[in-house]
């Protein structure tokens, strides 16, 4: 994870937009995919990604001092997604999730692919901001607990607790929605 | 330790977040607890489902759109800076012009003194001359002698050689006399 940029970032700091575009290409997947996972909406995710890269451009020198672009990008992305999420919609409590009404033995299998995706994306909304961020970074982005803690500015113990709660809530959500024990 | 106490460890175990020693303790409990085995399978399956749905690739067009928007914004930013600088320069230029004009405006107020009489030293003032400011502007406020005396200089001075000219403005107030000296006649 501890990647640092050499070359393009120095030219980008000097105002070379082509060099900054190379920097964006290097990190665009990290930013846009994380934002999409946290927000569940591609247009919101693109807006957040745009803002993240604009902030990166303005803080190139400062970020280099941190010697860890990924942690900075994850932190800013998570914070901006939290801002967007607070303005856009309240989180969904697991208890408020309607059960899927189906007479099939396996309701999950009867769902269309799109509906299944929608439900599973919605499942992340059942988590608190911190739990969602911890789960996305650990279980979907594949960061280690230490890296998640660094990105979120938390202790490893706190992150482990958040990940644990998030996994149990996700399991409860899926079980409740599909009305079967998965 | 009952099963509720195992829940946190099992949740961490499901994602591979326990040390080998901790993992062995969980595995020993799982071997003898059907309820916790069910919990573990549920945790693992929900993780698989979430990873699956969030693992779909994003179209390249979305990445390109973000890049284009960011670069467009960065290219616009310097343009806005130049516009601001240009605006400042124009404001400064306007201030300079105003400061250059300001004294003349003060003198113009003097020319509003009613019925001044112009007497040019050694020469008649040219038509439109004998003013405090540019001749064309203040000619209305000056009352030049219309007729030159015999042997006097021509009124326009167009063909006469340049010579200094002194314009004396008399006002109704005897305490106020205004002199205007030009470098050359008619200027």
Image (spheres, coloured by chain):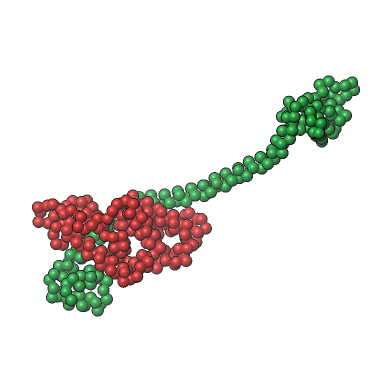
Chain colours: A red, B green
Residue B6, percent from left and from top? 20, 72
In depth, the one of A151 and B136 nearer the eye is B136
Quarter of the image with the N terminus of chain B in it: bottom left
Does the rendering let one see residue A143? Answer: yes
Q: Residue at 37% across / 59% down in the picture?
A: A79
Q: Quadrant of residue B30?
A: bottom left
The extreme right residue here reads B151
Quarter of the image with the C terminus of chain B in it: top right
Q: Residue at 48% across / 54% down in the picture?
A: A17
Residue A71 falls left or right of residue B114: left
Is B92 placed above or below B15 here?
above
The extreme bottom residue here reads B21
Residue A182, percent from left and from top? 16, 62
Residue B31, percent from left and from top? 14, 75
Q: Quadrant of residue A177?
A: bottom left
Is A162 placed above or below A54 here?
below
Q: Residue at 36% across / 65% down in the picture?
A: A152
Does the rendering let one see residue B184? Answer: no
How many marks do you count on the picture?
0
Residue B123 falls left or right of residue A76: right
Is A32 placed above or below B90 here?
below
Residue B43, percent from left and from top? 20, 65
In depth, the one of A19 and A176 nearer the eye is A176
Residue A165 falls left or right of residue B164: left
Q: Residue at 47% across / 51% down in the picture?
A: B74
């Amino acid at each position: 994870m501890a990647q640092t940029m050499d070359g393009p970032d120095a030219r980008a700091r000097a105002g070379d937009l082509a060099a900054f575009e190379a920097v964006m290409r290097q990190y665009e997947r990290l930013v846009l995919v994380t934002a999409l996972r946290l927000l569940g909406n591609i247009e919101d995710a693109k807006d957040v990604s745009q803002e993240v890269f604009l902030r990166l451009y303005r803080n190139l020198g400062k970020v280099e001092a941190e010697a860890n672009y990924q942690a900075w990008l994850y932190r800013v992305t998570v914070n901006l997604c939290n801002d967007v999420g607070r303005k856009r919609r309240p989180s969904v409590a697991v208890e408020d999730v309607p059960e899927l009404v189906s007479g099939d033995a396996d309701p999950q299998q009867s769902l269309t692919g799109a509906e299944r995706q929608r439900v599973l994306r919605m499942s992340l909304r059942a988590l608190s901001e911190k739990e969602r961020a911890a789960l996305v970074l650990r279980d979907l982005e594949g960061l280690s607990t230490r890296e998640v803690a660094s990105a979120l500015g938390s202790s490893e113990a706190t992150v482990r607790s958040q990940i644990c709660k998030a996994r149990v809530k996700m399991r409860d959500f899926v079980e409740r929605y599909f009305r079967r024990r998965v | 330790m009952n099963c509720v106490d195992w829940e946190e460890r099992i949740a961490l175990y499901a994602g591979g977040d326990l040390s080998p020693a901790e993992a062995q303790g969980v595995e020993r409990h799982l071997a003898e607890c059907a309820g916790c085995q069910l919990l573990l399978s549920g945790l693992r399956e929900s993780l698989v489902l979430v990873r699956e749905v969030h693992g779909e690739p994003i179209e390249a067009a979305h990445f390109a759109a973000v890049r284009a928007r960011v670069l467009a914004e960065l290219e616009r930013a310097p343009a806005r800076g130049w516009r601001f600088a240009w605006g400042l320069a124009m404001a400064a230029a306007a201030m300079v012009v105003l400061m250059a004009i300001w004294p003349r405006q003060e003198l113009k107020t003097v020319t509003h003194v009613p019925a001044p009489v112009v007497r040019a030293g050694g020469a008649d003032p040219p038509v439109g001359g004998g003013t405090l400011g540019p001749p064309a502007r203040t000619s209305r406020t000056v009352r030049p002698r219309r007729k030159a005396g015999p042997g006097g200089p021509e009124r326009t001075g167009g063909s006469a050689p340049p010579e200094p000219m002194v314009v004396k403005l008399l006002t109704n107030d005897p305490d106020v006399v205004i002199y205007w000296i030009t470098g050359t006649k008619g200027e």
